[in-house]
Amino acid sequence: MVRFATLALFLLSATSVVLDARPTHKRRAVCNTDTTTTTKTVTATATKVNVEAVKTSTTKTSSGFKTVTKTTTSSKATGTPDSSDDNGDLSGSVSANALFPVPGVNSGWSVAKASIPQAKDVTLTDKTFIVHKEASTSKRPVVTFSGKKAIRARMTKGSVTPGTSPAGGFSFYSPGATLNGNSPIVDLSKANEMTFGYSIFFEEGYNFNLGGKLPGLYGGINDDVAATCSGGRHNPGCWSARLMFRQKGEAELYLYIPPGVNQNDNKCGKKANSKCPSTGYGNSVGRGTWNWTPGKWMTVVQRLKLNTPGKADGEAEVFINGKSVLNVKGITWRTNKAAVARGVQMQIFHGGHTKQWASPKDQDVHFADFSVSILN
């Protein structure tokens, strides 16, 4: 059974990162930069992190999985939404195996109509998610785009965050999808292993500039502390596992994990502008293992397995279109068992926070097919 997880934010000290690349695939794990703030340190045992990049792999499926293909008659996906209507179902071609690439799902939800029996079907609207801690100027209209119900992120020229002028992208936190408007369909705080996935479409000709953040899972000892692991802020009570896009569409897993767990700075790589967490920022892992390709839908899923406090047995895995491309083991996500999964850190913006990271033009990114599962 393939197990996936979202990776490790390594920490401000020294952890041993081992890259187990296959002979036919080039791979790197590097640590990078975000924004500035203060850093706390705690004492913890050293963690050995093994990163395996996989160019191609075969995905196992369970008997409960099925593939559903739907046809679409919408206009071409050129970066302009077909309409701003926020009603109706998703269409387009989507595979359950791409959204739920790991068998053994106990429960979950999906806004795609290609889900599995264990996952509740949800319609994507403005009220699908229990939104909190949203950036004040964040904009996330639900539109019909390329045959799918999607959230549109407008990356305004000159923007580096959703909360400053000019604003671009969006930022909010959510425990997940809801059917009644009050409580999430599944309680991720009870999960030891889980997945979160979505489809993403960078418009044709998208200019990635220096890069930016993409949605991922997050957690912590409570809701407020859980939302602090970003922007250069490290806290032993929280963790986050966002994805990133870099120059020319290079992709990576971008992690914040508890400070104080030793890390070997020499294993961070020598790529330009890549820094270990001693700079105060998050960890770039597996950069360039895959690329974001403008002009087409791509489905990304992250599998995350929490570690047992006191043990470095956490895992993170990334799937692209149903195939495992990055697998990380030996992660210390938490030193406190109360630092459970809290939901999804829904963010997209260009940054860093300085102007050299800014979106060089008005351009759009669309998100669809959001799906979550609990494995155990």
Image (tube, helix red, strand yellow):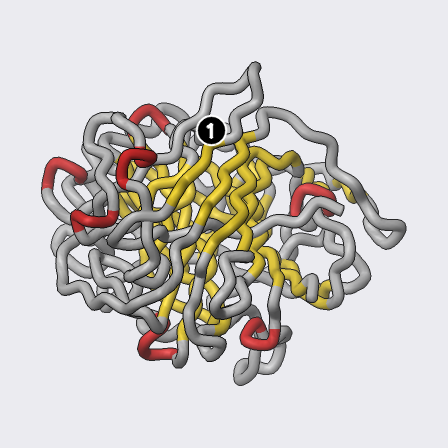
Residue 267, quarter of picture: top left
Measured along the vertical axis of the image, is residue 197 above or below residue 296?
A: below
Q: Residue at x 50, y 57 (%)?
A: 312
Q: Whole-percent x and y of residue 17?
A: 41, 40
Q: Residues within 10 Å of mark 1 (few under 14, many from 20)?
A: many
- Which one is nearer the viewer's eye here, 92 or 202? 202
Q: Residue at x 39, y 68 (%)?
A: 173
Left or right, 302 with respect to 215, comes to right
Q: Is residue 300 left or right of residue 113?
A: left
Total numbered labels placed on residues in the image: 1
Q: Which residue is mark 1?
A: 289
Measured as percent of width and height from the top left, residue 278 is found at 19, 49
Residue 81 appears in view: yes
Work out which residue is located at the far right of the displayed protein and give it: 63
Rendering quarter of residue 118? bottom right
Q: Quadrant of the C terminus?
A: bottom right
- Which residue appears at 54% of the width and 75% of the height? 189
As helix, strand or loop, the secondary structure at mark 1 comes to: loop
Classify 161 as above or below 56: below
Residue under the point 54% across and 47% down: 329
Give the camera-side residue of 101 and 357. Answer: 101
Given the current orientation, which residue lies at the most extreme bottom position?
A: 182
Q: Amino acid at mark 1?
A: Thr
Q: Is any part of residue 140 visible from this angle? A: no
Residue 310 percent location from the top left of the image:
48, 68
Q: Quadrant of residue 64?
A: bottom right
In x, y percent, where is residue 263?
Answer: 32, 48
- Above or below residue 135? Residue 157 is above
